Image: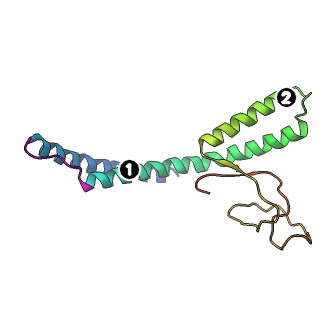
Amino acid sequence: METDIATAIDTLNNQMNAALAGLTEVAVAHSDRRKVAVRTAPIDRATAVFQRLVAEVVDDQLAEMLPPLVALRNELSQYCTVHGSHDCPGSDFCQRASETLDHVLALANVQSYQARIGDPLDPLIHLAVGEAERNDLDNGAVAEQIAPGFRSAHG
């Protein structure tokens, strides 16, 4: 992971140097008032590459951070379901903690996902934890949701 970040930073540095060279050309052209300064393709390319690389670094960081947050959210939800009755002193804490985690996940553009019973099992979306025989469902269909899933813009 550290080598990937170092490579991304080196690439960003090279792209920024190319962008600075392009900006210097534009500044030199603009210094002569009779010439019109225009954006150049190298600057546009460097900007696009820079934005893409920054997005990739952010996505990589989110990919590492989100699974533990989702696991914590699911564990907290399960604990609150078992222990969080209204007369329990920790029920307010469970509610606030769940809301806070939901808010953090929403800020990361992660939404709760409810599996629908009867939908075909999709290993890219669903995590099968067992098998159940049901005559009313096709083979390979979701039979029960144990815990909600979470989806981001990237899956």
Q: Amino acid at mark 2?
A: Gly
Say which residue appears at 48% left-offset and 54% top-offset: 4
Name the residue carrying label 1.
Answer: 50
Badge 2 crowding class, 10 Å Cα cut-off, few under 14, some 14 to 19, many 20 or more, is: few
- Where is residue 106, by image quadrant? top right
Task: Give the residue pinned by disc 2.
Answer: 90
Callout 1 secondary element: helix
Left or right of residue 59: residue 65: right
Q: Is residue 88 left or right of residue 155?
A: right
Measured as percent of width and height from the top left, residue 117 is found at 82, 61
Q: Which residue is most to the bottom?
A: 139
Q: Residue at x 92, y 72 (%)?
A: 135
Residue 11 shows in this picture: no
Q: Position of residue 129 (x, y in %)?
A: 82, 61
Viewer-proximal residue among 14 and 49: 49
Quarter occupied by the C terminus: bottom right
Q: Earlier in the sequence, mark 2 or mark 1?
A: 1
Can the viewer see residue 7 in this picture? yes
Magenta-colored stretch includes residue 33: yes
Task: Please identify the dominant SS of the magenta region.
Answer: loop
